Amino acid sequence: MSGEVFGRANDERTPLLRPRQEDRGNDDASNPFNYNATSSAEMAINSTDEDDRVLSQSMDEDNILGLLRRRRSYESQEGGVVSSSSLPGDLPHRPTNEPKTVRTGNLNLLSSKFESLDYDICENSLLIDEERTKGYQFIAKKDLLRWVIMIFIGIFTALIACCIDIAIEEGSGVKFNFLKKQVDQCVEDGCLSIPFLYWILCNLVPVLIGSLLVVYVEPVAAGSGIPQVKCYLNGVKVPRIVRVKTLIVKAIGVTCSVLGGLAVGKEGPMIHSGAVVAAGLSQGKSTTLRKDFKLFTYFREDHEKRDFVSGGAAAGVAAAFGAPVGGVLFSLEEGASFWNQSLTWRIFFCSLISTFTLNVVLSTYHGRPGELTYSGLLNFGKFDNTSYDFIEIPLFILMGILGGLLGALFNHLNFKLTVFRIRNITKRYVKVLEAVLVSAVTATVGMGMILYTNDCKPLGDDPTKYPVQMYCGDGQYSAIGAIWFQTPEGSHKLTSILMFFAFYFFLSCWTYGLSVSSGLFIPSLLTGAAWGRVVGMGMEYMFPDKSWVNPGKYALIGAAAQLGGVVRMTISLTVILIEATGNLTLGLPLMITLLMAKWVGDYFNEGIYDTHIRLMGVPILEWEPPPLSRNIHATEVMSTPVISFSSVENVGRIIDILTNERYNGFPVVDTPMYNDGRTFGKIRGLILRSQLIVMLQHKLYNETAESWSHKGYTLKLFRDAYPRYPTIQQVHVSDEERHFTVDLRPIMNPSPYSVMHSSTLPRIFKLFRGLGLRHVIVVNDNNEVVGIVTRKDLARYRMEKHMGNMRLSELTILD
Amino acid sequence: MSGEVFGRANDERTPLLRPRQEDRGNDDASNPFNYNATSSAEMAINSTDEDDRVLSQSMDEDNILGLLRRRRSYESQEGGVVSSSSLPGDLPHRPTNEPKTVRTGNLNLLSSKFESLDYDICENSLLIDEERTKGYQFIAKKDLLRWVIMIFIGIFTALIACCIDIAIEEGSGVKFNFLKKQVDQCVEDGCLSIPFLYWILCNLVPVLIGSLLVVYVEPVAAGSGIPQVKCYLNGVKVPRIVRVKTLIVKAIGVTCSVLGGLAVGKEGPMIHSGAVVAAGLSQGKSTTLRKDFKLFTYFREDHEKRDFVSGGAAAGVAAAFGAPVGGVLFSLEEGASFWNQSLTWRIFFCSLISTFTLNVVLSTYHGRPGELTYSGLLNFGKFDNTSYDFIEIPLFILMGILGGLLGALFNHLNFKLTVFRIRNITKRYVKVLEAVLVSAVTATVGMGMILYTNDCKPLGDDPTKYPVQMYCGDGQYSAIGAIWFQTPEGSHKLTSILMFFAFYFFLSCWTYGLSVSSGLFIPSLLTGAAWGRVVGMGMEYMFPDKSWVNPGKYALIGAAAQLGGVVRMTISLTVILIEATGNLTLGLPLMITLLMAKWVGDYFNEGIYDTHIRLMGVPILEWEPPPLSRNIHATEVMSTPVISFSSVENVGRIIDILTNERYNGFPVVDTPMYNDGRTFGKIRGLILRSQLIVMLQHKLYNETAESWSHKGYTLKLFRDAYPRYPTIQQVHVSDEERHFTVDLRPIMNPSPYSVMHSSTLPRIFKLFRGLGLRHVIVVNDNNEVVGIVTRKDLARYRMEKHMGNMRLSELTILD
């Protein structure tokens, strides 16, 4: 039967499943599916045994990227005629079950520990009953509550952002005054090493505190949190990412990092904060605080929670950049696959509330209540009257290309560094030590630069508030302003800007990925503003008389190019920058620059967030199915065999299966046939591990299959347990009860989405992604369950560059 | 078998389909589906025969809305216990086949003449072969081409907008100078009736021309075009909506309408223009011009075309309002169900190009080349420094409520008027006469107001450019400026503003729906600005000393409230207004106002575009499935029986079926059994009418079923014929050829999305909407085709207000 392409045919973990003829019903020679299947088999797979041999060799550091990349690649063929010998039976064997030869810290692994969120609503009879009983008023009430919760998410996100901002501002003030006193004393005595040591100390201590918190209390709070939020919005459960503990560590950690003078910003962590606030508020309970407020229990499902988290992330962006529209677009760009008008509207409202709250609080804090002029924490200064000329567009394109190149270099260096960290810096105290080391180096470089360049006297009579602002705390934002607005005749000489650029580029690259909470936006913007400023100086030199030559504008474009080259965000970043500068006119230049930066950068590698996500092994799904994948069929993609349950099932069997298997979803079938461990049967529904556990925990089973009573079956049981269900080991069932039977039908999802075994990968992908599913059941011609497709099965397939060509490659799934 | 709920059981058009026991395989008592099906049956349907009796009575004008609303309503029950007698067998009979008692011009009809666009890609073997043969380069090339086309869409859309704008400006100038000469002459002679007659004439002639064009040349060009574009983006094929002829009539028509002094704007038509430009450019051919440029043939499918049209609509918004981000959000809000990052990015680029082009052209036209300060056609003036105070928020809420009330009143009056027009103004010349009448009344009212109020001397020595600007052409936009920026001490007295408001409200209501091209944005903004101005005066009177009391701000909020109350757009309108005013600070006030206006307005009726869409009977799909519909199952929703084809089919049978049936998609099944006209068989694929016609047209059939040659089968045949395929009558097949056989397998979609017969309406809805499908096949337990669900089947179900409660009601499908 050439019609069946069973990709995992020789895989040990997934033994050969070749349905016997009688199981496949009318699957005879006249079966029209054969037409297609044959053509897909013919189109087979130009891979040789060499790929496999390569894998089994031990690999050294350098070629791990190239060689591990693919074992079997579906090359894009120019011809089309393939020798008939490459039939499915000859498919090279997939080494997914040989993880020994694979080292961590590369881009081609998928960790199997990440689970999908489930956007699909389990329409079991309990839900239908609830809907019928409570009627429209219930729906209207839920809808109103969603708005109320969004208001609170906006307010709390902004308040946390304010706290971080004020703490940094006050802390910097204290630190500055202390250092100033030391220097003043020293200038009299003629020494400089003592204030230098004090400076180092003032930087080391906060970084040490921040790093200890992150390493020992909550490691998931490291970094900017944007990759994690991105994963969550993409539909992946990242453990502990939306807990209150994470939020606390993150908020204190980022304050410490910024106070410690690291090359970091506070914006990324604010986005993460917003996500945590949203998850916490919408669920009305907290695992960290061990408190269930019994509020909003109807929102205790992945679907609702993810909607709120989208709002929280948007509110975080809105607070950080004063960009409510940018916040909405960020959430959409990074997350929501299904655009929903009313949800988007709520997210926008949440963002605006957040901007407004931040505005009110900061205006009041700065002694100008009611003025509402603080539109965001990141202050770009005024760009109101900046315009541009037609002939500048080529320059913007060139700057975009330069940003893309620099961004790609940054990402490459950071990638190498991160791989090194994953492999070598595994001990906790080493992580803390590295953070402290970076802090010391940063302080030394900063001090050295100030002394060397003599640009501004170290701590002299400068009338500005914090003269050495470039390296202390919130001064960074003023530094952007300084780089943009000061004329070349001002205090910044060309050499000092170039030195700043070089040091800051490498320092921020070294810093990102440390075990501290840190954002990447500000360092990238600063780096880019520095070289953009240099471009601006050059333009002024070349066109001294043109009115449109404004060095500040080039600094902004440079900042955008650098940031775009690093993070590769597009539409949301454009809008964020438009909103942060308050200048709509520069929209097209910003966009052209970002577009070029993305295209050029993408030629070399991925955005930094995506690189980190792939190093984590998160099975993230792209927007579109991988190209050239229409010759891959469900039979190849799916996991098989599938463990299924009968609709009326034995308690003991459920416990055994849950104990021995790690699957989270089980098809429910009728008339299962027990033959060599596999069950076959017509699809009846889908039941989740969590549902089974709750049922067992509450003993929703009967002694005999005849005496049904569904009295205890309420949705409340399932909502109360969400989202952290007990393990099967925590559920106690007596030996006698093991012979009881469970009726799965009132609980299971009675009509899960399923696809035919002949469906192609793009088709399954679209279904999965478009509807936010967690499981897709694959059925054969008789509606019998033959496989199941989960996120990992789809995320395996990726388009990768290989020897200059694009190829469809497959990632390795690690257990 | 209580398990089967066949909704159309007694429907004449769809005779009873009750699969015999042997067809349904394992559907015995232990079938777990029964659990669910029974519960859905129990939950049945609280409807009585009364509903039906009401329908059969003849209805008078007044109760048509209330009574026609529903025949069978699924009431939201408080209890939940329903008498067991209301089993499916007792379901009241659906009168979808009794259109005699239903009059046109109500909200509860769906026309069956509208077809769905098909977002799903037919993954037949030709496509897979193409993908395999052409490889990745082909994909990259297509992607690049998409960008290029988007650039051109942006440029051409902006150019058309510029042409309309310049034509209006020049035309107004000519008209004004002519009238001024007449008045000057008359002031000397002491007469006023002659210039009045000239004024009337100057208005009547353009309106007459515009109206004749619309009525006799292209009726679909009437109105703003936004409802039609909205339908198209929603996935409905609206005939002739994206043709070049429509574009020409629209562009000339709207110029005439504005020149004729009607209470209309030119913004809506620009959005429509953008959509036409996009459709034309992306397809590389034009039906109107009968020209096929053989360009971009790979984009000849619904999927690609709709993507480009999204970009065109966004470019139209960007050109009209100088709001590129607003344009993107408009396209998303009105259309795209599946948010796609790269598509959105392209749309944004297209919008920015459009803004930029408009900017360059208008700057040059106005003699200031290179300045790039014209950001859009709608000039709101400068709001740069306008801020607001916390205590103003309640006022914004009140203004939002007022806007909602006024908008609902506007929509109600316009709805009544439109129903009257649909029923009574059917003759073409009467439509033209009505337009001319409205024009004459508008001119008279304008003249009268000027004479009565003596606000500004009719055509005297006023130094401004067009003193009687309020009623001539583009002067309207200056009028907004005047209302917003002039202080109350200026020329506008309170009474004249109130009179303006009252007349303009009713005139614009009368005008919308006339057979002329016309936009609704400007009249609504003007009306709202007028009453907002009055609020501003009141605030100044009450708080004379507050710095934040700025009458211009209230005029803007009033304009937003009125427009929001009429069109009920939300996120995109907020962003459009933010971008048009260039003021981000007023984002929250605008949003609060729009939110209140929408909520209050939605309490009474729908947005005006939605009302017109429903009066057209377009089967538009909401974002979410109707609430309280989980007790409706596929068996009830689907059309049944289904005409199916065998995978190798007889030519004669295909011709007969295509001639006698109007369906557009046919399931392909194996072993069809011919019993009383129905075919039963396992699902093998889906074939479209258009595909069959192209196959017959090119004689892709063989004499015997044994001698296959798929030589002539290329995708080109299908792309060349897109989108207007011949009818079956135009395809000539000889009597001998009728006995030949066609192999459908290489052409059909081999794995169409299907759902189980037990799936619920929300589940099918999400699949359909999320993936943009045109057909969903319903299969039974054995994977046999039992029904098919199309857009109309889903659009029938709507949540409606009925006696103060919300109910799920069902619309009537007209043939």
Image: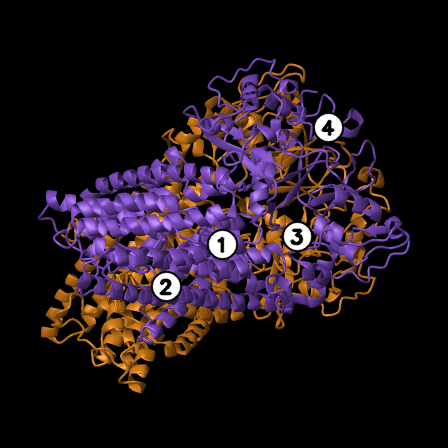
Chain colours: A purple, B orange
Disc number placed over residue B761 in the picture, else none:
3
Instruction: Measuring from the top left, give residue B663's x and y in whole percent.
Output: 61, 40
Q: Are marks 2 and 3 in contact (CB under 8 Å)?
A: no
The residue wearing badge 2 is: A168
Q: Mark yes or no: residue B309 visible.
A: yes
**Residue sitting nearer the eye, A632 or B188:** A632
The residue wearing badge 1 is: A214
Q: Secondary structure at mark 3?
A: helix
Q: Mark yes or no: residue B422 visible.
A: no
Mark 1 or mark 2: whose residue is earlier in sequence: 2
Instruction: Give the alpha-carbon distance from disc 3 to disc 4, as whole Å.
Output: 35 Å
Q: Dot 4, how many residues are within 10 Å of its Cα: few (below 14), some (14-19), or many (20+)?
A: some
Instruction: Measuring from the top left, give residue A801's x and y in whole percent.
Output: 44, 29
Instruction: Give the alpha-carbon distance from disc 1 to disc 2, as whole Å.
Output: 18 Å
Q: In the rendered picture of this protein, how many numbered marks are placed on residues?
A: 4
Q: Are marks 1 and 4 in contact (CB under 8 Å)?
A: no
Q: Secondary structure at mark 1?
A: helix
Q: Dot 2, how many residues are within 10 Å of its Cα: few (below 14), some (14-19), or many (20+)?
A: many
Q: Are marks 3 and 1 in contact (CB under 8 Å)?
A: no
- Is there one chain holding both mark 3 and mark 1? no
Q: Are marks 3 and 4 in contact (CB under 8 Å)?
A: no
The residue wearing badge 4 is: A17
Mark 2 or mark 4: whose residue is earlier in sequence: 4
- The answer to which quarter of the image holds residue B517 is bottom left
Instruction: Measuring from the top left, give residue A389's x and y in whole percent.
Output: 19, 47
Q: Dot 1, how many residues are within 10 Å of its Cα: few (below 14), some (14-19), or many (20+)?
A: many
